[in-house]
Image (spheres, coloured by chain):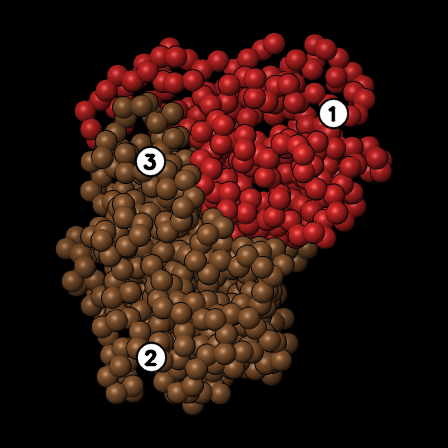
Amino acid sequence: MMVASLSHASYSATFTSSPSKTIVSRPSRFSPSFKVSTFLPLTVKPLNSTFTPHAQRAITAIAHATSTPSSIPSDTSTKTFHGLCYVVGDNIDTDQIIPAEYLTLVPSNPAEYEKLGSYALIGLPSSYATRFIEPNETKTKYSIVIGGANFGCGSSREHAPVALGAARAKAVVAESYARIFFRNSVATGEVYPLESEVRICEECRTGDVVTIELGESRLINHTTGKEYKLKPIGDAGPVIEAGGIFAYARKTGMIPSQSK
Amino acid sequence: MASSLVSPSPASSFIRNKKYLGFSAFPSTSQISIQKCKKQVSKKIVSLMAPQQSERKPATTGSVKTGMTMTEKIFARASEKPQLSPGDNVWVNVDVLMTHDVCGPGSIGIFKKEFGEIAKVWDREKVVIIPDHYIFTSDERANRNVDILRDFCMEQNIKYFYDIKDLGNFKANPDYKGVCHIALAQEGHCRPGEVLLGTDSHTCTAGAFGQFATGIGNTDAGFVLGTGKLLLKVPPTLRFVMDGEMPPYLLAKDLILQIIGEISVAGATYKSMEFVGTTVESLNMEERMTLCNMVVEAGGKNGVVPADSTTFKYLEDKTSLPYEPVYSDAHASFLSEYRFDISKLEPLVAKPHSPDNRALARECEDVKIDRVYIGSCTGGKTEDFLAAAKVFVASGKKVKVPTFLVPATQKVWLDLYTLPVPGSGGKTCSQIFEEAGCDTPASPSCGACLGGPKDTYARMNEPKVCVSTTNRNFPGRMGHKEGQIYLASPYTSAASALTGYVTDPREFLQ
């Protein structure tokens, strides 16, 4: 199994105005065991040759790379997401994604990170009959969230995309995003924020099996048989490609690399 | 003043990033504005399109600068570039980074992971750490989060840490301030022309000082902590021109609710909102802060009010750091321009469950309410309480529902107990509130604006109907998912408390 290993190395923080120090970088909180196992297609049969064991390992590694905002470059041309989708409406604000009472959980603390995930989308009103996470469970069975306009509006709380990612959602496909949520998704690498050309939230139902092909900018709903064009990622592309804001800054020389 | 429909091409340079068009089905923003103009002439609000300037390309032998908006200029200076256009992605130097107890620990965690356990912040005088969200609670994690902030501040020798240790008596904490956005202003951290980032969506409040201020997440904040820079995209600017004398029953909250109702919760996504006009010039700093505070509720990236003598006077006794205001060029390009004749506007509410669910307060007078909440960065400042007191003085009666008062900061709390309320014969706000039967003003913090831990004062733990001076009313915002929150100005909130129904303050003020 390919794993993302961060270099345990020293580098000088020459960027800051204080005297440079030799620092040993710590392992990322995204240790390999977090995401890899849950990328396996869930209750659905593997879809054709994309999911042969060899390809599956490669996809697993790439999927893991997206979730690690580190120095691992992610190759979008072959990346796919596959699984059940969970459909929500317009203006899903951050209080619905992760209610404020759970914000005492600190996302950079691994145990609290997992706990955050268990509360993802728990703020949705009771009109949503199907819960994103079953009451007795801590992870979601829906890899992909499909939303309407202005997804993630409201607060700047990074806990929002973190909760979705910690719950094991892989991507959000919304008609449009609120600015801070989109930015936080890109910066953390927790969920891939994609935009649809049309309101697929009106054409998909929770539980539909979908595949997203990033290279093709395409979403396929296997349950309905329909395909949808996705918008290109735009300016955020280079940051996502690099693996998040820190990786991008290192790649472009804005901050020193973590040398081997 | 009608303007001709311009061809999409000058506008297209602003439409480079489709993310800031909430509706891609429309041909161009200009057509929407013109249609609004035709439809709403009878509504006394006229939205107009500013004449689009064709951009002048720099001559090859020298640079001919194209006009820039305030926000573009601030970006240009902060990124050390002579000229910028909306859509440009640049690394900006950050003047102030703010964080609080909810997002601080996470930001610190990322900072340490990415820069190392013993890394130092880029500038110990430019990081302002303000515990304010979950303070007066017995929730252990919430208390622990304040401890995390303290440990970090001690380790980094952070100059501005507004600490609290004694949760039983806020006054026993000399450094503690309260709500971060109000503390930033009161402590002189907001200065014209600067870049202020904060791990809170209402950081945009500081735009009232003519600076670029916006909310960011933990990861971005962790990055800024180590570098003092951030990669940001230059937003195009929407201009809101408000002219006319403020009627005595309107407040800045009504103005911003008007605007959000006009353009929707995504109407300003990725855009800057610039507020100008004689009405804006007549507002004091706290009212300007209210205006900019809810920019994020329209999806806005930031709000700005040009700095003027009101700004300079406010800052006189608060900061000795030099600053240089910037102003939009006369020939700068704006994405759209909206004009309002303020004298024609009426008190508003935002009905459940969205800040853009605008309605006239007088058309909601059959809505029975259970409680009123006056507090938060939006509506818990000294001016907000003075306004509420004015209504109680005019009425002379008692409130009919529990009325919760949560001053934003220690300074505001003190003002409630010391400042005389005009027209009351020398009484203070606190006396007037007591006579009206309101709850005693609570310990300053964000309080129940966002619900918080279950034991938070005034949290909505059962489905109730609340009129509130706060900023958001999405489902569950103040605690209970089925709670109904009507956002309103302090005038409208006080009036509603007196009748037990949503009430237009003209019942008491004229």
Q: Which residue is mark 2?
A: B432
Q: Which residue is mark 3?
A: B148
SS for dot 1: loop
Q: Which chain wears brown? A: B
Q: Amino acid at mark 3?
A: Ile
Q: What residue is drawn where x is 56% and y is 17%?
A: A33
Residue B41 image position (x, y, % from top left): 59, 81
Same chain? Circles 2 and 1: no
- Residue A7: where, in percent of width, then height? 41, 13
Q: CA distance from mark 3 to mark 1?
A: 39 Å
Front label number (2 vs 1): 2
State the residue at coordinates (29%, 18%). A23
Q: Nearer the viewer, residue B270 or B105?
A: B105
**Residue, x 64% and y 38% (percent of image)?**
A172
Residue A8, horizontal then vertical, whole percent: 39, 12
Q: Amino acid at mark 2?
A: Ile
The N terminus of chain A - image quarter: top right
Q: Which chain is red?
A: A
Q: Residues within 10 Å of mark 2 (few under 14, many from 20)?
A: many
Q: Give how far apart the Cα atoms at labels 2 and 1 are.
A: 62 Å
Do the dots labelled 3 and 1 sit on one chain? no
The residue tagged 1 is A42
| Side of A95 where A247 appears, left or right | left
> Which circle's residue, 3 or 2, is located before the other in the chain?
3
Residue B218 point in image, percent of width and height: 42, 38
Number of marks present in the image shown = 3
**Which residue occupies the foreground of this view, A48 or B419?**
B419
Q: Secondary structure at mark 2?
A: helix
